[in-house]
Amino acid sequence: MALNNSLKNLAIHLDKIAYGTAAVLGIFILLCPNIFTGNLNYSDIEEYRSLITKRKDDPVIIPPVQSILDTLQKQWIVLPPIQGTWIPGWSHEIHPGVVQIVDTVVEQKPTHEAGKVVKISYNRDKDRLKVFIHVTAEKPAAANKAELKSVKLLRKVISTPPAANADFAEVKVFAPADEVFQFDDFDVKPGNLYAYRLDSEAAIDPKAKINDEDKAGFETNKSSNELVTKSPIPWDYAIKILSALPYDEKTGTAATLTGEITWWDYLQGKVVKSQKMNWKEGDVFGHKGKNNRERHAIQRIESGQITVVDRSTPTLDKETLKTSDNKRPVELPGEVVYEEPAPATSADATGAGADAEPVVEEKAAKKAAAKPAEEEEEPPAAKKKAATKDTSKKDPKSTKSTKKKPAIK
């Protein structure tokens, strides 16, 4: 019942609603010329009319048209703040951001990094009956339009006594395309120390477009670290001479040697010590080869020295040993591994950093090496006795009284 009443009331007032809507629409139509013509006034209208009249006689004349686009842009433009930056509250007031993916080429400087000599190990070859050094190096790197041209392994002999003008010399040339840089150096002599270094040469691709500044800063030649053997090359045998007496012509007594002989057995892969202590000329010892023949023989015994022959060599190489050679090594030393330098500390600025410590150790090593081989440490009892004796002596200055003299009134 209530619904029917509402419909009746709406039908009664429907004509009023129609009149109101027509009035609003008429007002809007009347205001349209003023809205879309911006600041256009009556003088402009008269000017447009005159131009249209003239255009009948001259078609070239085109009356100006009000730009609606400029008006819209002025209405929706976002002006920047007076200071700083700000983000408008309405999203439609912010210019849309467009992400574009563009392929670009980043120019990098050509690089050439030096290689590294990372490890030195001592080995023995049972076929050649010889000690050799196995050198392992890390490949140099050339990148960014640069390529390796040559890689060389160099060696310097640190002999005793030092050779004149000893310097690095080439021992192996590697191919730049190689990935493994290893070398077995058989040209080594017992008692010497050796240092190894890796030199590389690189060049920039001539077709590459590199600026002059990068070309000038590119280093063509690079040298690696110098890795030095810490222990001399060992011998294949050693003789500790206790006494060496030559042939006595008056009594006819044969020459005799009393001593300890040790050698490296290549079949067993270890150091062997002979139980025999008394030797004479012609006695043999050492590693037994394929024909079960000892490698070395005592050829001559003189006063304080002997001559030994290596029977495995075609020329029967000879070597004379004295008591000063009693402690030459036979056992293989441990490998030498490259260690990255320690980072600089504040103490380095004063000159008393990490560089000072190796010098002290080197001096201590030289001082210890300067002691004669026969010199042995005093027994503890002797040291204690000497200390007791020294403390018994009183310093004359220490006998003076330490009491203060009374002050004179």
Image: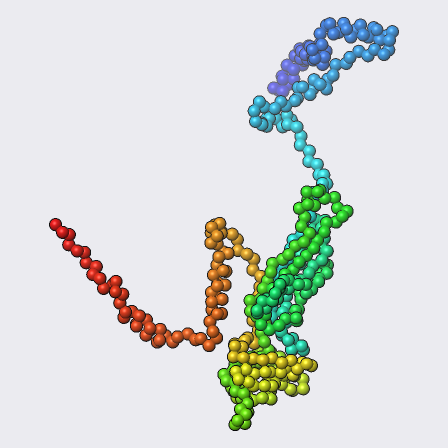
Q: In the image shown, does 310 or 12 lie closer to the viewer?
A: 310
Q: Kindly identify the residue that appears in the image at 62 percent across and 83 percent down.
A: 309
The quadrant in which residue 52 appears is top right
Looking at this view, is 190 or 290 the one in front? 190
Q: Is residue 74 above or below residue 122?
A: above
Res. 181 in view: no
Reply above or below: 157 against 18: below
Residue 63: percent from the left, percent from the top? 80, 11
User: Where in the figure is residue 276, as x and y percent of width and height?
Assistant: 53, 87
Residue in view at x 67 percent, y 66 percent = 183
Figure quadrant of residue 216: top right
Where residue 343 sits in the image (x, y, percent)?
Answer: 52, 53
Q: Quadrant of the N terminus?
A: top right
Residue 370 image offset from top left, x and y in percent: 48, 70
Residue pictured at 48% horizontal, 57% vertical: 356
Left or right of 204, for residue 403: left
